[in-house]
């Protein structure tokens, strides 16, 4: 039923509008992909900021004489920085199979990667009881903290994107149904 109203309105818009239907809200929503571009830019900027912050903490830990506490801070910051670097590169890559995905699917793919990172870091923390892995505890904790943040971040971005598009389409459908109801009364 929604498609019927949308198609009917598209036909009316193209016949009455000399510029075509590219000025409609639906065309902007589906054509310009402003929301998707904003969410992708937000993801890239946030990850870049987190990466730089972890780098500053890492540099500070390296600039001071080594102690056990500073080495732990170094490992923690290194784990966070490596995680943010991976996701920063993932969002910027232009490989053929990645660039064909929509932004929403890219965000969901990043969410899946972040979940995998989180699960692997959790498994490593559970198995840190072995002495040979105890030195990597701060690194793993940093990865766990960063991947937990990224899981929530990508989930929010992806859900916002899918919910926003659905809400916009529902609002347009409601407006068009009201318009057709008014047209049928006249």
Image: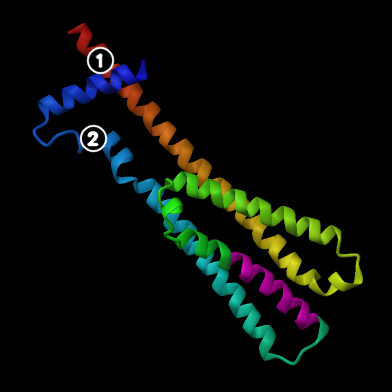
Q: Quadrant of the N terminus?
A: top left
Check the image and report above or below for 44 versus 69.
Answer: above
- Using the image as rendered, state which of residue 98 and residue 123 is in the foreground: 98
Q: How many marks?
A: 2
Check the image and report above or below for 93 versus 61.
Answer: above
Residue extending farthest to the front is 96
For the point 91% across and 72% down, the residue is 131
- Using the image as rendered, state which of residue 4 and residue 171 is in the foreground: 4
Q: Which residues are magenta?
A: 69-84
> Residue 82 magenta-drawn?
yes
Dot 1: within a 10 Å radius of its alpha carbon, few (fewer than 14), some, or many (20 or more) residues?
some
For the point 59% across and 77% down, the residue is 55
- Using the image as rendered, state which of residue 82 and residue 65 is in the foreground: 82
- Using the image as rendered, state which of residue 82 and residue 48 is in the foreground: 82
The image shows residue 21 at horizontal and vertical percentages of 19, 33
Residue extending farthest to the bottom is 65
The image shows residue 8 at horizontal and vertical percentages of 23, 19
Q: Main secondary structure of the magenta part?
A: helix
For the point 65% across and 84% down, the residue is 60
Name the side, left or right, on which 145 lies relative to 182: right
User: Helix or strand or loop: what does disc 1 sit on?
Assistant: helix
**Mark 2 highlights which residue?**
24
**Mark 1 highlights which residue?**
180
Name the side, left or right, on which 72 lies relative to 131: left
């Amino acid at each position: 039923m929604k498609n019927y109203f949308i198609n009917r309105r598209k036909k009316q818009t193209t016949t009455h509008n000399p510029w075509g239907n590219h000025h409609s809200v639906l065309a902007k929503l589906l054509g310009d992909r402003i929301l998707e571009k904003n969410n992708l830019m937000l993801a890239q900027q946030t990850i870049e900021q987190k990466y730089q912050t972890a780098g500053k903490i890492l540099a500070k830990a390296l600039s001071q004489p080594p102690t056990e506490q500073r080495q732990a801070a170094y490992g923690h910051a290194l784990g966070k920085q490596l995680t943010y670097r991976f996701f920063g590169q993932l969002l910027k890559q232009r490989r053929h199979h990645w660039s064909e995905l929509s932004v929403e699917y890219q965000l969901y793919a990043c969410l899946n990667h972040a979940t995998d990172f989180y699960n692997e870091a959790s498994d490593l923390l559970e198995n840190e009881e072995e002495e040979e892995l105890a030195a990597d505890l701060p690194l793993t904790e940093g990865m766990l903290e960063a991947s937990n943040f990224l899981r929530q971040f990508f989930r929010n971005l992806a859900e916002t994107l899918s919910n926003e598009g659905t809400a916009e389409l529902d609002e347009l459908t409601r407006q068009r149904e009201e318009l057709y109801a008014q047209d049928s009364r006249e």
